[in-house]
Structures are given as C-alpha cells and as structure tokens.
Amino acid sequence: MDVLQNFLILPLFSVIFFIIFLHKWRSTPQKNLPPSPKKLPIIGNLHQLGQYPHRSLYSLSKYYGPLLLLHFGRVPILVVSSADAAREIMKNQDLIFSNRPKLSIPDRLTYGSKDVAFSPYGNYWREVRSICVLQLLSNKRVQSYRSVREQETSIMVEKIRQMGSSSLVVNLSDMFVSISNDVICRVALGRKYGEDGKFKKFLGEFAELLGAFSVGDYIPCLGWIDWVSGLNGKVKKVAKLFDEFLEGVIEEHRQQRKRDVDLDFVDILLDFQRENEGSFLAADDDVIKAIILDMFAAGTDTTSSVLEWAMAELIKNPRTLKVLQDEVREVARGKEEITEDDLDKMRYLKAVIKESLRLHLPIPTLVLRQSTQDTKVLGYDVAAGTQVMINAWAIARAPSLWENPDEFYPARFLDTNIDFRGLNFEFIPFGAGRRGCPGISFAMAINELVLAKLVHKFNFQLPNGEREENLDMSEANGITIHKKLPLLVVATQQAY
C-alpha cells in the first residue's frame, strides 16, 4: 500500500512543481534583447569578427540593425553601429556606460590600469583625468609647446628635402612615426629618445600589444593559448622594458629639477606630486608612468596614422592635393616657413584632415566601454556588465548620413559645422562623452602643421611610375589602423 501511495504521490508533486515553475516563468518579464546571430559553443561569436572587425561588424549591422548583441565566449558584447545608438550610449546614458572592462594586456602594460584610457570609472579615474586635462592638455599648455612642433616639423622637412635632392624614395609612413615620436618625447620627457630606432621599435610593440586579443579574457578555460602563443611573454618583456626606461626618466628629472621654465610632462607631474601629498599621484610613481605611456600610445600611434592616411588619400587624388597646395601656398606666399599662426586661414586643410578621419578612423571601434547597471537602449534590454563596442567606422560610412560615403571628398566639410569633438555623433573618431579623448587639441596641432608644411614645400609622385589611382590602401591589423604597406613617394621641392 505504501509503495502504491508513493507511486501516486510522486507524479502529483511533479505536476504541482511544473505548474509553479510555469507560473513563475510566465510572470517573469521576458527580456527584449538586441538581435543576435547564432553563436558556437565555447567561443560564441568570436569566429564572426574576421581579420578586420570594424568591417565584419559593419556587414553584420546591415543585416541585424544598429544594435547587435554578440558573445565573445560568455561575455555579452553590444555592437553599436548608428549615430542615434551612439548618442544614447555616449550622451543620454553616458554615466551608465562610462566604465572600462578589465582586460589583461592593457592592465599589465599600464600598471594595473592606472592610466586614463583603461582605468575603471570612479574617483581615481576622475582625478587622473582632471590632472591630464588641466595640467598637461589644456589649450594654454598645448600652445606652450608650439616651438617644439615648429622646430621638429622643420627638421622633418629638411630631411625630406635632402632625400629628394638625391632622388631617394621617401618612406612617409616612417617619417610620420618619427615626427610624432620626436614631438611627444620632447614634450613629455624633455628630450628626444631612440635616435637608434630601438625606442620606436619598443613603442611600436607596445601599441601593437594594446590591440592584441587575449583569449583568456573571454574564455578562461582557453587562457593557456596566450602562453603557448608567446603573447604573455611579449607583454611581460615590453612592460619590463618600459618600466626600466621610465624609472630612469623619472629619476633623471628628480635630479635635474626645473623651475617653471621649459617644463615637460614629467616635470609637471612630479611638481603636482610634491604639492599634493594626498592625491593618488603622490602615492605611487606608477601613476606617472601610466599617464606618460598613455601620451605615447595616443600621441604617437594615432597621430602617425592620421597623417599617413591623409597623405595617402591626397596622393591617390591629385586634384584634391592640388586644391590643398594652392590654398597653403597662397596663405604662405612670400614666407619661407609656415607657422601655426597661418593654420587658421587654411579651411581646406582642416576639411582634408576631417575627411581623412571620417574614412580612416585611427581606432575604428573606439575603446571598449562597459555598462554598470541594467538599462534599455533604443527599446532593447542591456544587462549590467555588457561590454560595448561602438563601430565609429561604420557610422562614418553610413549612406543615410553621408553622400557618396566611400569617396574622399573634403569639400563636404566646408559648409557644415560638423566637427570631431564629440558633439556630432555621425562623426566621432575620438569618441565622445566622459571617455572621449582628452588630447584632441594636442593631436590636431601636430597633424595640421605637418600636413601644411609638406604640401607647401613639396610635390609628390609614386616611385617606379606607379599610377596614383592604383595606390594600395589596404589596412594593417592592430588597435590603431595603419596602412598595410608603407607610403613610399618621390618628393621634389616646389620652385618659387
């Protein structure tokens, strides 16, 4: 009899539990998640990133829409591919999306994410960013380094002139890395380093590693791949090299303390450290090192990328180059050297740089953000902890926003107020909101002066009779997108 009762009770309890579960399931609000392609076991959607993620994600957005939910392993990734969605993330809900995910490689390279770019949102980030904006990157401070920019660009012009007079092919890609590095070294460290090329090599490895993908960040069980591939070893080596180098720089500055004359970034940060004993900066030299590394990563790599693509587009479009040369040479008529005072008169020059930035964003998907709480974006539910990838490259090529979006046409910027400072979400090469790039003025001062001086002094042709329209515009991989092949030219001095 007991056996029979148990036999009858078990199904009864099962039915009761099923009814309770069904009731709870129906009463729980169903999430309205963004559209998402099917994912594979373990890796999720990683296989859909492709060699050039900004292009692969753009193709996916055409099918799935402006908001797309992917999974890298188990980590949810919200891909944003429209100006409206970008405005929602970086303006309307900027506070919710101002955090950075903790990524192992940037974390190890920047002293536990003590820099501005990768540090998590909070009091520490606010203080460090304030130091950078007010002490290092204010308009007054940027202008104080004007003589450095003018001197270094003149040195660059003379190098190209000498090579041109000897009919040598000029590697402009290398020239742009050198001028960016030399200016940043003098401004940040007080003097130039790496004339033997070693410093530039390490800096290039640093920038490359910042953009490297660590499998262990998204699929912990496969983290061993980063060791087997040698990635972790490279990170350890580069981090050690830069730490030793920066230790020496800081010690040298402490021994040769300057007094309000020709102060570089390290001088300023050390003065701030001495005068503000309670600040994060005073507690640890690693903060100074991390900030300086930010300046190099952003100032050298992205600046050289902007110049490289701008010159490549100008050479590929000779008529556009001629228009720019006419403007610059008219403004500089009768002058041997262009100065920064001349740049405000060069509207077309500024339009050329904007158009190059639109087509060739230095960091096409910007730096990852992370949501700090559950929220809704354009009607879709987004969970706390979701990483956000804003495909600024896709937005800048959207046919709904730009006429003939794949065409290099600087004149489109002449009769518009659209700018790159984070107010126009159809054009956000430097991001926007709290996590937007604080060094825009610093970068543009170099870009405009270099480009103006080049087209003022020289005419350019491709070597070996190569036709301009056949110039290879393929992209290399990395966090910052450079040309895959270096930009090689024959530069002849303009006769006056």
Image (cartoon, rainbow, N blue to C red):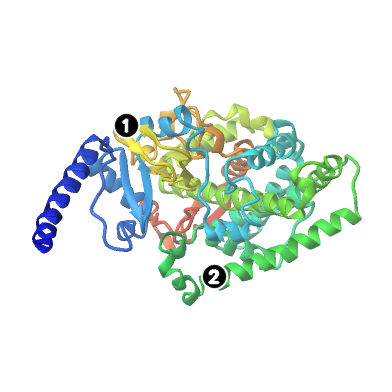
Which residue corresponds to the image point at 45% horizontal and 61% vertical from the top-left?
213
Evaluate whether residue 194 shows in this view.
Answer: no
Q: Amino acid type of disc 2?
A: Asn
- Residue drawn 84% across and 59% down? 251
Q: Residue at x 46, y 73 (%)?
A: 224
Given residues 3 and 34, the one toward you in this image is 3
As drawn, 176 above or below 433: below
- The quadrant the C terminus occupies is top right
Q: Give percent across and percent down for residue 46.
A: 34, 59
Q: Is residue 454 visible?
A: yes
Q: Residue at x 17, y 47 (%)?
A: 18
Say left or right for 426 vs 6.
Answer: right
Residue assigned mark 2: 232
Amino acid type at circle 1 is: Glu
Q: Quadrant of the N terminus?
A: bottom left
Label 2 vs label 1: CA separation?
45 Å
